[in-house]
Image (cartoon, helix red, strand yellow):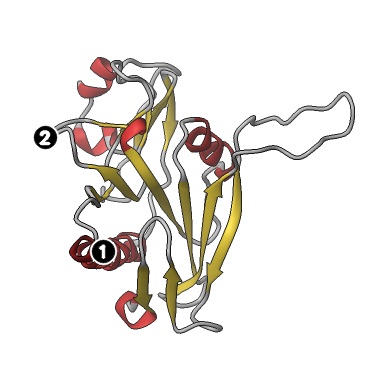
Amino acid sequence: MSSPGIQRPDLPETMTWEELEQLPEEIAEQIELWDGRVVWRERGPAEHQEFTNLLWSGLRRCLREAVVTDPQQCWNVHTRTDVFFDASEKSDFMTPDILICRNSRGPYQDVRADDVLLVGEVLSPNPQTDLAASKARYAKAGITWYWEVALERERSSIEIVRAFALETTHGELPQGTRPLYPANYLLIDKWSPKDSDAIEIDFPFPIHIPWSELAF
């Protein structure tokens, strides 16, 4: 994570991937490109990185256990990895905190949205990110699962984890209206240390992560 003292430079509103690569790493890692538009990512406190790593570790363990019973589970769990929405171009991408993706392309390959099964974001108190727009972009790309991990305001701990699944059919809207975002996620489950012993769900593979594994 970059130093909080680094100032954002005055950049153009749009950039290409090639132009982004020319920036210093500590600046470039704070930027996503949304159809070429420069979007700054929120830089959270130390807890943000810590809980990202703890969740990665728990999901990775669950995936390894799933592979034992189902060797066809050809997935990897990553943190802070760019997801490119175009099949060949790289100036449209987002960088989720957590992602699970297909590992069929071989080593050292870019991650394309078509290969991603789940993305997740760790949300510090008072997040500055436009969550609705971010979720809509992942949904439009057809990524099946989206998780939000909200952190406590007063303590270094997780407040709640929410799991969303991609909506495949749409409800009826009042005549003359249409959704701002054609693709959307629906809340499937949620877990909190106050009312559950663990994060537990059978999708996208059997997941059981006790809160003790997610302690700061």
Q: What count of labels does the image hold?
A: 2
Looking at the image, which residue is at 52% across and 76% down?
192
Where is residue 195? Give x, y as percent. Answer: 56, 83
Q: Residue furthest left?
A: 107
Q: Is residue 138 left or right of residue 5?
A: right
Looking at the image, which residue is at 45% across and 84% down?
197
Residue type beneath disc 1:
Ala
* Label of residue 108 in the image: 2
Task: Tell me: residue 111, above or below residue 197.
Answer: above
Task: Tell me: residue 209, above or below residue 168.
Answer: below
Looking at the image, which is closer to me, 116 or 97? 116
| Residue at disc 1, secondary structure | helix
Q: Is residue 107 left or right of residue 158?
A: left
* First-in-chain label (2 vs 1): 1
Where is residue 29? Give x, y as percent. Answer: 27, 37
* Label of residue 66 in the image: 1
Q: Nearer the viewer, mark 2 or mark 1?
A: 1
Q: Quadrant of residue 143?
A: top left
Q: Residue furthest right?
A: 175
Looking at the image, which residue is at 23% across and 25% down?
23
- The quadrant of the rendering that contains the C terminus is bottom left
Local crowd size for mark 1, using a 10 Å CA cut-off: few (<14), some (14–19), many (≥20)? some
